[in-house]
Image: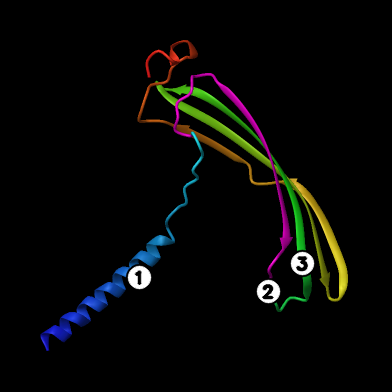
């Protein structure tokens, strides 16, 4: 009889732990991993980057909506600027990323062919990061000598 009660307690506590983990997982934040984000760079360096993304295809939607054959073609242009700085003796970076997207959506709505085109800014990103572990912030003249 005691073994049955202990098994029931184990099951109860297992369910409680799983429920707690499920609730806590909603509080978890995602991490954005960027290549070479932790690698040191000399203080005062400027980096410019540009990118282009092309996305097209069908879009899934609620079947109860009176839309048939919804598809999209999106073109996104991204510009980025990075500046390395000295933050109290530690290497730091300031990143600014600005995407601009233009897109065209086609579908049949209530048995009428429809299309719409939109252009605008995406979600801009401004990030300040500091490397607290590793080498100290260095000017370009001292950078290669002692890391």
Quadrant the C terminus occupies = top left
The CA distance from mark 3 to mark 2 is: 11 Å
Pointer 2 residue: 62
Q: Using the image as rendered, state which of residue 128 and residue 135 is in the foreground.
A: 135
Task: Mark 3: give few (<14), some (14-19) or many (20+) Cα within 10 Å.
Answer: some
Query: Which numbered dot is residue 70?
Result: 3
Q: What residue is at 43 percent from the left and 17 percent from the top?
A: 138
Q: Left of 49 or right of it: where is 45?
A: left
Query: In this view, which residue lies farthest toward the right?
Result: 112
Pointer 1 residue: 19
Q: Left of 1 or right of it: where is 9?
A: right
The CA distance from mark 1 to mark 3 is: 38 Å
Q: Which residues are magenta?
A: 37-62
Whole-percent x, y for residue 7 in the image: 19, 81
Q: Left of 16 or right of it: where is 59?
A: right
Asked if the stretch drawn in magenta spans residue 51, the answer is: yes
Whole-percent x, y for residue 94 in the image: 54, 30
Q: Is residue 127 above or below residue 22?
A: above
Asked if the stretch drawn in magenta spans residue 9, the answer is: no
**Which of disc 2 and disc 1 is earlier in sequence?**
1
């Amino acid at each position: 009889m005691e073994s049955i009660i202990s098994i029931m307690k184990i099951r109860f506590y297992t369910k409680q732990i799983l429920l707690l983990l499920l609730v806590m997982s909603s509080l978890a934040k995602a991490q954005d991993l960027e290549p070479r984000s932790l690698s040191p760079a000399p203080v005062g360096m400027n980096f410019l980057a540009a990118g282009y993304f092309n996305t097209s295809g069908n879009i899934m939607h609620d079947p109860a909506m009176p839309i048939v054959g919804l598809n999209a073609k999106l073109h996104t242009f991204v510009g980025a600027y990075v500046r390395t700085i000295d933050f109290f003796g530690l290497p730091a970076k300031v990143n600014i990323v600005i995407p601009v997207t233009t897109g065209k959506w086609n579908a049949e709505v209530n048995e009428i062919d429809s299309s719409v085109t939109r252009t605008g800014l995406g979600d801009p990103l401004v990030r300040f990061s500091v490397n607290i572990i590793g080498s100290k912030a260095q000017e370009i003249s001292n950078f290669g000598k002692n890391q």
